[in-house]
Image: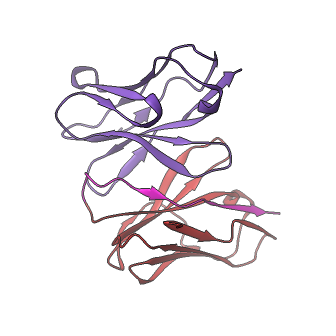
Amino acid sequence: DTAVSQTPKYLVTQMGNDKSIKCEQNLGHDTMYWYKQDSKKFLKIMFSYNNKELIINETVPNRFSPKSPDKAHLNLHINSLELGDSAVYFCASSQGRGPYNEQFFGPGTRLTVL
Amino acid sequence: AQSVSQHNHHVILSEAASLELGCNYSYGGTVNLFWYVQYPGQHLQLLLKYFSGDPLVKGIKGFEAEFIKSKFSFNLRKPSVQWSDTAEYFCAVKMWDDMRFGAGTRLTVKP
């Protein structure tokens, strides 16, 4: 049983392309997140959605656009990819908002921009 | 600035050695604290968490952590590491919706 799944697992693309990463959770959670992990393993939050509503939007280029069609899905679309976008992107989910809810992470999508 | 600091970037131990990984945070007010582990090529998994109560919390796989409020610390410990503990360890602090991670500590355990 996969709790938080992401597709694709690996994504290799050229600069300037547009790509999407999909995330789905089957935990019944209503809050979902996108994180970026750079080559030094530093993990930084990008976005968070609660009940399909954007609640966290860190300083991220507007080339990145999250979309939540329903509570179980949070997709990440990236326009005009740049070399610096190469990283591992993790989706996560938690039950509700607030400080007490641990986050469950997906397996990650390794994006390589050539 | 609000931050989470993990002072050890890379720790190398032999099997059966004791482990302590440091984590300090600089947020004021009530925080909730987590340690996550990331095995090579895998996603983050929760090791343990602290919300309130006994400041010594026990997690999975023999890990424990101690919250010391006066020192703004939440150090991770294990009395005897195994080769399978080789991984990246992340301390995290959550205020409300916002969870901030430290830079991670890579642990290498030599057999």
Left or right of residue B102: residue B97: left
User: Which contiguous range is marked in magenta?
Assistant: A98-114
Q: Can residue A92 be seen in this view?
A: yes
Where residue B88 appears, as percent x and y from the top left, is 58, 36
Residue at the image position 68 percent from the left and 71 percent from the top: A8
In the image, residue B71 sits, relative to residue A54, either above or below, namely above
Where residue B103 appears, as percent x and y from the top left, is 53, 37
In the image, residue A43 sits, relative to residue B65, either above or below, namely below
Between residues A92 and A85, which one lies in front from this camera angle? A92
Between residues A59 and A1, which one lies in front from this camera angle? A1
Residue A99 in magenta stretch: yes
Q: Which chain is purple?
A: B
Left or right of residue A23: residue B86: right
Where residue A27 appears, as percent x and y from the top left, is 40, 69
Residue at the image position 56 percent from the left and 56 percent from the top: A36
Left or right of residue A71: residue A111: right
Q: The red chain is which one?
A: A
Between residues B101 and B18, which one lies in front from this camera angle? B18
Q: Give the quadrant of residue A17.
A: bottom right
Residue B90 in magenta stretch: no
